């Protein structure tokens, strides 16, 4: 984790094994009950799994215990991107920006879905959302104006980002707090790609149940690895630019909070698209991620001289 000319592979291995093993252990009851996505405890299981990368970091720190005393607690917190916030203004404003940027990425993906005709949307009468609401209450139950409910849902996304932050922190402490800096001696791009790919692989206990893509097979895992690699580059960029894990935490929380945007705007007569293509992490959103990454790369945002020195040196 601390600056070095090569990665601390024993600590990285302990982190990887611990986070994956604990995620499978937590998901094991869902697998044993055999109800798959219908399991009533699936949401709770997914939330509990988000803690495991943070526990993996603690295991990795235990491996590094001989060097912890020399570095001190303050240095460890800095290396994990937790504290202090330096530069503070950049970190705080990046956190604010990503809370709004994450749902914009989802919205752009939905716009592309609509343009390609993969699904149809109704942003005037919100017919699909209205139908969903009416089906969820007894017939004849009066409902507030659907436009008001949509507005409330949209306004709640930033609130949801904050509510989701404690859960996202458990993951981001591992992926962008520990793993990305630990891999930095390999270079900026290898560190971004490997940490993102491993993040996707870590989701396997849920993905193999059909979570996200309805593909309970290797294809689902490969799709998750691809999605997390691309999104992980964007989250990793915030870590590289600010030396703080907090922008990634809030971006992760905001993305999760906005993943259901399509439900608000889908039309009643819309075809049902495959989540592989049009889901929040589907192939169309991959394209949105890729365009943003390309813009960042072309403007030099991943250059070594723009990466905070606290994340470790470039390879020599």
Image (cartoon, rainbow, N blue to C red):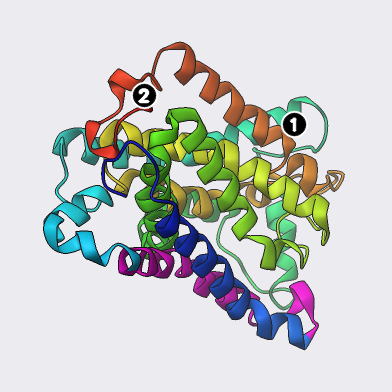
Q: Is residue 42 magenta?
A: yes
Q: Is residue 41 magenta?
A: yes
Answer with the quarter of the image where residue 57 lies. Answer: bottom left
User: At 53% across and 49% down in the image, what residue appears?
Assistant: 258
Q: Secondary structure under badge 1?
A: helix
Side of 273 where 186 appears, left or right: left
**Residue 278 point in image, percent of width and height:** 75, 41
User: At 27% across and 35% down in the image, what residue appears?
Assistant: 242
Q: Is residue 197 above or below residue 301?
A: below
Observer-nearest of 287 and 19: 19
Q: Secondary structure under badge 2?
A: loop
Q: CA distance from mark 2 to mark 1?
A: 47 Å
User: At 67% across and 52% down in the image, what residue appears?
Assistant: 263
Question: Is residue 157 something that shows in the picture?
Answer: no
**Residue 65 point in image, percent of width and height:** 25, 66
Q: Is residue 37 above or below residue 122?
A: below
Q: Is residue 43 above or below residue 166?
A: below
Instruction: Magenta stretch: give its range.
Output: 34-62
Q: Which residue is under mark 1?
A: 114
**Residue 166 point in image, percent of width and height:** 36, 64
Q: Which residue is under mark 2?
A: 316
**Residue 44 point in image, percent of width and height:** 56, 77
User: At 85% across and 48% down in the image, what residue appears?
Assistant: 272
First in sequence, mark 2 or 1: give its number.
1
Observer-nearest of 45 and 131: 45
Side of 256 where 140 appears, left or right: right
Q: Is residue 59 above or below residue 314?
A: below
Question: Viewer-nearest of labels 2 and 1?
Answer: 2
Question: What secondary structure is the magenta-colored segment mainly?
Answer: helix
Q: Decide: few, some or many residues near mark 2? Use Cα within 10 Å; few <14, some 14-19, many ≥20.
A: few
Q: Decide: few, some or many residues near mark 1? Use Cα within 10 Å; few <14, some 14-19, many ≥20.
A: some
Question: Is residue 220 something that shows in the picture?
Answer: yes
């Amino acid at each position: 984790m601390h600056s070095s000319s090569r990665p601390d592979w024993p600590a990285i291995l302990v982190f990887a094994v611990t986070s994956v093993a604990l995620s499978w252990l937590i998901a094991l009851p869902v697998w044993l009950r055999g109800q798959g996505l219908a399991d009533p405890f699936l949401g709770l299981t997914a939330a509990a799994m988000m803690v495991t990368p943070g526990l993996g970091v603690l295991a990795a720190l235990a491996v590094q215990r001989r060097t912890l005393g020399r570095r001190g607690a303050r240095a460890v917190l800095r290396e994990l991107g937790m504290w202090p916030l330096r530069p503070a203004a950049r970190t705080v404003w990046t956190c604010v920006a990503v809370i709004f940027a994450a749902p914009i990425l989802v919205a752009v993906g939905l716009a592309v879905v609509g343009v390609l005709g993969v699904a149809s949307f109704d942003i005037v009468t919100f017919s699909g959302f209205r139908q969903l609401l009416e089906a969820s209450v007894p017939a004849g139950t009066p409902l507030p104006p659907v436009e008001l409910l949509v507005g409330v849902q949209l306004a709640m996304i930033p609130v949801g980002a904050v509510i989701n932050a404690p859960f996202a922190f458990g993951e981001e402490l591992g992926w962008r707090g520990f793993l990305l800096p630990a891999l930095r001696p390999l270079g900026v791009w290898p560190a971004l790609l490997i940490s993102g790919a491993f993040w996707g692989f870590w989701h396997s206990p849920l993905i193999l149940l059909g979570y996200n893509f309805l593909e309970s097979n290797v294809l689902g895992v490969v799709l998750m690895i691809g999605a997390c690699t691309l999104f992980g580059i964007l989250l990793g960029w915030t870590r590289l630019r600010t030396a703080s894990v907090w922008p990634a935490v809030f971006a992760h929380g905001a993305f999760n909070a906005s993943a259901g945007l399509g439900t608000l705007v889908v039309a009643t007569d819309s075809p049902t698209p495959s989540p592989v293509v049009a889901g929040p992490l589907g192939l169309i959103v991959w394209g949105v991620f890729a365009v943003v990454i390309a813009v960042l790369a072309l403007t030099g945002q991943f250059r070594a001289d723009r990466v905070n020195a606290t994340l470790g040196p470039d390879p020599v």
